[in-house]
Image: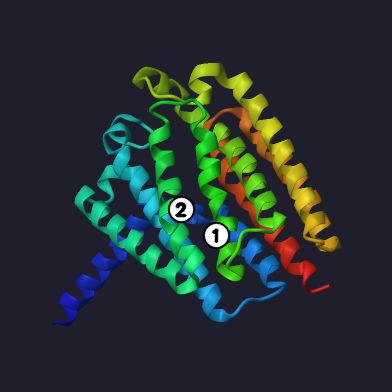
Amino acid sequence: MMQRNANQAEQEEHFITRFGKFIRFSHTVFALPFALMAMLIASDGWPAWTVLGWILWCMVCARSLAMLFNRIADWEIDKLNPRTVGRHQLIQKSTALMVWAVAMVAFCIGAGMLNPLCLVLSPVAILLICFYSLTKRFTVWCHAFLGLALSAAPMGAWAAVTGQLLSPEPYLLALGVLLWVSGFDLIYSTLDMEFDQKQGLYSFPSRFGLRTTRQLSVLLHVAALLVFMVFGRVAELSWPYGICWLACIGMVVQEHRWAQQGDVDAVNKAFFQANAGVSVLLLLGVGLSYLT
C-alpha cells in the first residue's frame, strides 16, 4: 500500500513537472508583474486579500488556457519543428483539451468573483488571449497580437480593483506592454525563421529578414520605455520607479546585445532573462514608490 501510494505521488509529481514545461509556466513572469502594478496603483497601495487572491487565480487560469490553446492549435506544426518537436510528448492532446476547458471555466468563475465588469469582459479576454495562436497562419504582425493579448493583464487587474476602465493609467501600461512584448517576440521568432519559411507560416523575420526584424525590435522597445516613463508620471510614482526605469534601459540594451549574437542560447537569454528583469524591475519600482 505504501509503495503504491509512493508510486502514485511520484507519477503526479512528474505530471505536474511535465505540465509546467508544456505551458512554460515560468513565463508567467512576463505578464503577472504588470497585473500587480495595475493592482497596486488602482488600490493606491494594497487591495483586499480576496481581491489579490482572485486576481492571481485569474492570471494563472488565463496563462494556462492561453498556452494550452497555443499548444493544441500548433500540435502538428510543433511535431515538425526541431525546436519544439518534444512538446507533444509531455502530455496527451486529450488531456490538454480537458485542462483547457477546466481553465476556461475557472477563469470565468474567478472573474465573476471579482465584479460584474470582469465577468462581462471575461469572454472578450478569453478570445483575445487565445486568438494570438492562430495569427501566424495569416499575418506577419502576429507578434503584435501576442503583445495585445498580454496587455490585457494590467487592464484586467485595474478592472478587478476599481470596477471601471475610465482612468488613463491602465491604458498607458497596456500600451507599454503591447510594445514591449511585440519587440521581444520579434527577437524570439528569429529562431524559427527558416522553419516558418519552409512551412509557409507568417512571421515578421520570415518575410523581412534578421536585420529589419532586429531594427524594428529596437524601435518597439524604445517606444515601450518612453511609454513606461509617461505611465510613471501620470501615476505620480516617486523616485524609486525612476531608478528602476533607468535600470530597465540597461536591461534592454543587454537584451539586444544578446539578440545580435544570433545563437539559440543567446536569444533565449534575451527572451527570458532580460524581459523577466524588465517586468520585475518595474514592479519593484511601483512597490517601492508606495513605501517612500
Q: Real-space Cα distance between discs 1 and 2?
A: 8 Å
The percent position of residue 149, horizontal first and vertical second, equals 50, 46
Q: Confirm or deny contact between disc 1 and disc 2 (CB under 8 A).
A: yes
The image shows residue 140, relative to residue 152, as above or below, that is above
Q: How is the image coloured?
A: rainbow
Residue at image mark 2: 125
Residue 22 horizontal side relative to residue 29, left or right: left
Write the residue at 40% across / 46% down: 130
Residue at image mark 1: 156
Front residue of 58 and 91: 58
Let me know if residue 250 appears in the view. Answer: no
Write the residue at 54% across / 52% down: 152
Badge 2 density bin: few <14, some 14–19, many ≥20, Cα 10 Å? many
- Amino acid type at image mark 1: Gly
- Amino acid type at image mark 2: Ala
The percent position of residue 220, horizontal first and vertical second, equals 67, 34
**Mark 1 vs mark 2: which is more N-terminal?**
2
Please tell me the numbered disc located at residue 188.
Answer: none
Q: Secondary structure at mark 1?
A: helix
Front residue of 132 and 199: 132
The image shows residue 70, relative to residue 142, as above or below, that is below
Residue 56 horizontal side relative to residue 77, left or right: right
Write the residue at 41% across / 48% down: 127
Q: Quadrant of residue 285?
A: bottom right
Front residue of 29 and 230: 230
The percent position of residue 179, horizontal first and vertical second, equals 64, 40
* Placement of the C terminus among the 4 image quadrants: bottom right
The image shows residue 238, relative to residue 228, as above or below, that is below
Q: Quadrant of residue 234?
A: bottom right
Q: Secondary structure at mark 2?
A: helix
